Image (cartoon, rainbow, N blue to C red):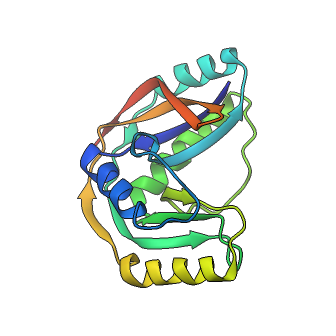
Amino acid sequence: MRAFVGIPLPEDLSDRFEDLASGLRLGRAVPAENMHVTLAFLDDQPEEVLAELHEALSAMTLPQPEIAIEGLDLFGGAKPRLLFASVTAHEALTELRRKVRQAVQRVGITLPHERFRPHVTLRRFNRLAPFERDELERFLTLQGGFQWPGFRPEACQMVESLLTQEGAQYEVLASYPLSK
């Protein structure tokens, strides 16, 4: 089962992101209901391993971070792969990710060692033509300073990600409360 652990967004924020991203014709938009902050991408795992992870996460006290949006940016350098909203990496968010990753590794799931750059994916791109890259740059000039006041999520979630012809379909498998 393909899954991840992430933080869901409030509906008003995900709807605003969807509206914002619709101003760009390039790439494939992420539907509002699929927008989240990923803490750990688990890839394909047996259900038994995910059940063990559920038990581990359920037994933990997880910190409640503040999630604040500090602008739009691109991953991929000269060949952009995605447009994202940058999330401020507050200490509690970094600690939450660390705890989740420790639980994931304790149940035997290997995670890549990567720098944590918290974000919300808004659009995905394949190859962009030079004129499309110019359109993307104009969009970032106009909308790149987008900000959203901080909010405190009530929970993080383990989510199944089923890949279909229409894109990824998400189903929440479990929620884990976050404490102040």
Q: Is residue 60 above or below residue 10?
A: above
Q: Where is residue 92 in the image (x, y as percent from the top left)?
A: 39, 54
The reply to whether residue 87 is in sight is yes
Q: Which x, y percent locates residue 103?
A: 59, 34
Closer to the camera in the image, 20 or 8: 20
Q: Which of the pair 90/26 is nearer the observer? A: 26
| Residue shown at 63% from the left, 42% from the top | 41
Q: Quadrant of the N terminus?
A: top right
Residue 72: quadrant of the picture: bottom left
What residue appears at the point 53 percent right and 19 percent down from the top-left corner? Answer: 55
Residue 126 in the image: x percent, y percent?
A: 70, 61
Residue toward you, 67 or 36 = 36
- Which residue is pictured at 35% across the width and 46% down the height? 9
Picture mark count = 0
Q: In the rendered image of this protein, does residue 51 appear above or below residue 6? A: above
| Left or right side of 123 for 130 | right
Q: Residue at x 41, y 60 (%)?
A: 22
* Quarter of the image where the C terminus is located: top left
Q: In the image, 61: left or right of 81?
A: left
Q: Quadrant of residue 91?
A: bottom left
Asked whether residue 59 appears in the rendered view, the answer is: no
Q: Going by the image, does 132 lie left or right of 64?
A: right
Quadrant assignment, res 66? bottom left
Question: Residue 75: x percent and y percent?
Answer: 62, 69
